Image (cartoon, coloured by chain):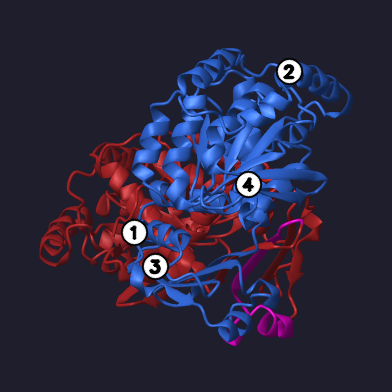
Chain colours: A blue, B red
Amino acid sequence: MLSKALNAPQISLTGLQNRDHLCSRVVYRRFARNARPLMSTVKRKSPCLCVANAEKLENASTSTASKTSFPVMVNGCAGNMGRAVAEAALSAGLQLVPLSLTSPHLGNQKIQIGDVEVDVRSASEKDDVYDLILQNYPHVVVVDYTVPSAVNENAELYCRMGVPFVMGTTGGDREKLLDVVRKSNNYAVIAPQMGKQVVAFQAAMEIMAEQFPEAFSGYKLEVTESHQSSKVDTSGTAKAIVSCFQRLGVSYDLDQIKKVRDRTEQIEKMGVPENYLGGHAFHTYSLTSPDNTVAFQFQHNVCGRSIYAQGTVDAVLFLAKKVKSNAEKRLYNMIDVLREGNMR
Amino acid sequence: MLSKALNAPQISLTGLQNRDHLCSRVVYRRFARNARPLMSTVKRKSPCLCVANAEKLENASTSTASKTSFPVMVNGCAGNMGRAVAEAALSAGLQLVPLSLTSPHLGNQKIQIGDVEVDVRSASEKDDVYDLILQNYPHVVVVDYTVPSAVNENAELYCRMGVPFVMGTTGGDREKLLDVVRKSNNYAVIAPQMGKQVVAFQAAMEIMAEQFPEAFSGYKLEVTESHQSSKVDTSGTAKAIVSCFQRLGVSYDLDQIKKVRDRTEQIEKMGVPENYLGGHAFHTYSLTSPDNTVAFQFQHNVCGRSIYAQGTVDAVLFLAKKVKSNAEKRLYNMIDVLREGNMR
């Protein structure tokens, strides 16, 4: 089953950093483990998987792939966000690896994403899945949209394996996560907010606050944010932007942020389209001068997951570019991705 | 008349750069000129103006002024913008010099600004007016809101005199203006846009465009600006912001900017208050993602002249601070003013 999944074409990114050492690591790990690999059945059925398929896949890569394409593995692609990223990756011309990991408590399943049938495997099989991935997709970039409880363990695994990864999953022990990745000598992008344009706006506000302290001194601020009614806490982005305005001289407490969770108010007051009531992020910041003669208003209104999926694909392209150019192996963020410009 | 005008208290800014050399220059200029000084009548009536008033003014300064106050001369204060700046300077606790220059074609007049009666003199008298100013207000900062035809001549005069100045007047030969001031070894702020917060927003967009090229690639843009119906050309600020969006990857031509000059549309569509139809600057920039799931909107809506007057006073405070700290004598702009933070 797995071997069939791996028959999808594997495309090399010319100049990608040599990862030959991974092979020996895979062999070492296979022998080092006491537990019998869960994939051993598959492997026995296809004893020459590595060699035979490598040749087959190499042929496929030269015939079908665009020059910029490379394999992307999306873990958690049975979830809404993971699926959106997998679809965006395909739309961007990348090669979706037909294997994905999900929570250890969920059973295996197959899901169709575009024309790729993805074999979704329980995280309990991860060692074996990665053995196959590293053998057949040595230039893979991994995207993680799993669950908060898996964040730290997954990141540690990616670092040990030396695969570049984009961590889109929120939660977990963030401090530990960043610390582990920083020390790992690996390529990674970790960002709590993958919406590239929202990050750009946020960064512009940060820069304005840093460069022009107190520029809006005395101005009054009103902040309203609307999210799907299941979101209990206040928008983190709104809080971050408010902290910029505070440094710009505006007197405002975070608890003054108005949370809109009522569906009628969302439609009538915020203008949220009805079909996005279940998934949106609308923000309005209104500044008024002390004498009421000047008003500024900034809005960023996001419906659905498209912006985050596109931003994640940009982060994937960024990592591939970093690997290709032998750039510094380190932890990057969405600001770094934005600085790189358009990579499509 | 002039001597009476000069009886207003003169306040020293402790630590202001020594300008004793100006006295000798004044004397030199007075002898060098062949024409009889127009002020000679006044001077004859008050032969000891410099000495007598200096003592009087010094006493006044120690008794009434706040520590941060210093004299500001507003040229063109009979005009709307000049008057607004003069009023804002008074509100900020600065000392308004009771002398102002206007166009050479206009007759002398007296105008009341707050509790200061300002003697507005024709520009043809400027040499004499400045002789008196330099004698009695050696620490003056000059603000210019005159007419485009006077911009270059006035700036050259301020530079020759060595008085720090804020040029708020638009028009004239701007290239020559900047060139002359740059070579003059004088403190000056020249800016076509004095609205500090608008400049901050513009700078943030500039930085975003510079740092994150193509971040909004594929986004659609709509720009609408509304100004008083007498404004024929398209908003320069709108053009500048559009150039940022172009660098951010948006395909948009300057001639697509929608100019609103119809009063009904201004009220109903743009929300311009009726009493500001004659003087406002409203701007709306709307960005939409290619798949229409993401929308950004930025607005800066200015009614009247208050923001420009306040910004000009900030520029004046900035120059006084630069003089006081013996900073580099050079041409500054509103970005430099913004970087200085809140000076009030």
**Which residue is the site of mark 2?**
A48
Task: For the residues labelled 3 and 1, say whether their Cβ atoms are less than 8 Å apart.
Answer: yes
- Chain of the residue on which disc 4 is drawn: A
Whether labels 2 and 1 belong to a single chain: the reply is no
Q: Nearer the viewer, mark 2 or mark 1?
A: 2
- Label 3 CA crowd tier, 10 Å (few <14, some 14–19, many 20+): many
Name the quadrant containing residue B115. Answer: bottom left
Spatial separation of the CA atoms under disc 3 and disc 4: 50 Å
Whether labels 3 and 4 belong to a single chain: the reply is no
**Which residue is the site of mark 3?**
B86
Spatial separation of the CA atoms under disc 3 and disc 1: 8 Å
Q: Nearer the viewer, mark 3 or mark 4?
A: 4
- Label 4 CA crowd tier, 10 Å (few <14, some 14–19, many 20+): many
- Magenta stretch, residue numbers: B263-290
* Residue B244 in view here: no
**Which residue is the site of mark 4?**
A311
- Chain of the residue on which disc 2 is drawn: A
**Which residue is the site of mark 1?**
B72
